[in-house]
Amino acid sequence: MQIENEMMTRFNKTENISDSLSTELDFFFDNVMDTIVDYFKEEVNV
């Protein structure tokens, strides 16, 4: 039973890390896309 609890704890930590990484990547790519869109908007206006 102790081993099962330990495995569940590790799995949950891994899952949280994965969720955190996914959130960070979403944030990063949203910023990149916003920057690219802004750049092209300025280029078209100039």
Image (spheres, rainbow, N blue to C red):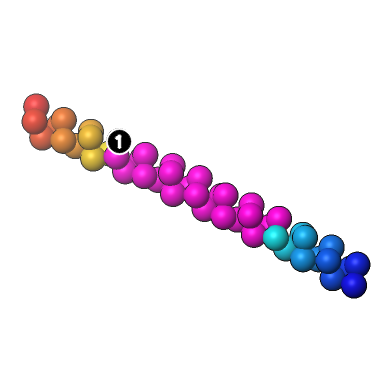
Q: Hey, which quadrant is residue 37 in on the image?
A: top left
At 77% from the left and 66% from the top, the residue drawn is 8
Residue type indicated by callout 1 = Thr
Q: Hey, which quadrant is residue 46 in on the image?
A: top left
Q: Which residues are magenta?
A: 13-35
**Residue 19 falls inside the magenta stretch:** yes
Left of 4 or right of it: where is 32? left
Q: Which residue is mark 1?
A: 35
**Where does the N terminus fall, quadrant-wise?**
bottom right
At 77% from the left and 59% from the top, the residue drawn is 10
Considering only vertical position in the picture, is 26 above or below 8? above
**Residue 10 falls inside the magenta stretch:** no
At 89% from the left and 68% from the top, the residue drawn is 3
Taking the view exactly as shown, the residue that stands out farthest to the left is 45
At 19% from the left and 37% from the top, the residue drawn is 40
Taking depth in this image into account, of 1 and 29 the one nearest to the observer is 1
Q: Determine crowd level at label 1: few under 14, some 14-19, many 20+ residues with C-alpha closer than 10 A.
A: few
Considering only vertical position in the picture, is 24 above or below 39? below
Residue 39 spot, x, y in % from top left:
23, 33
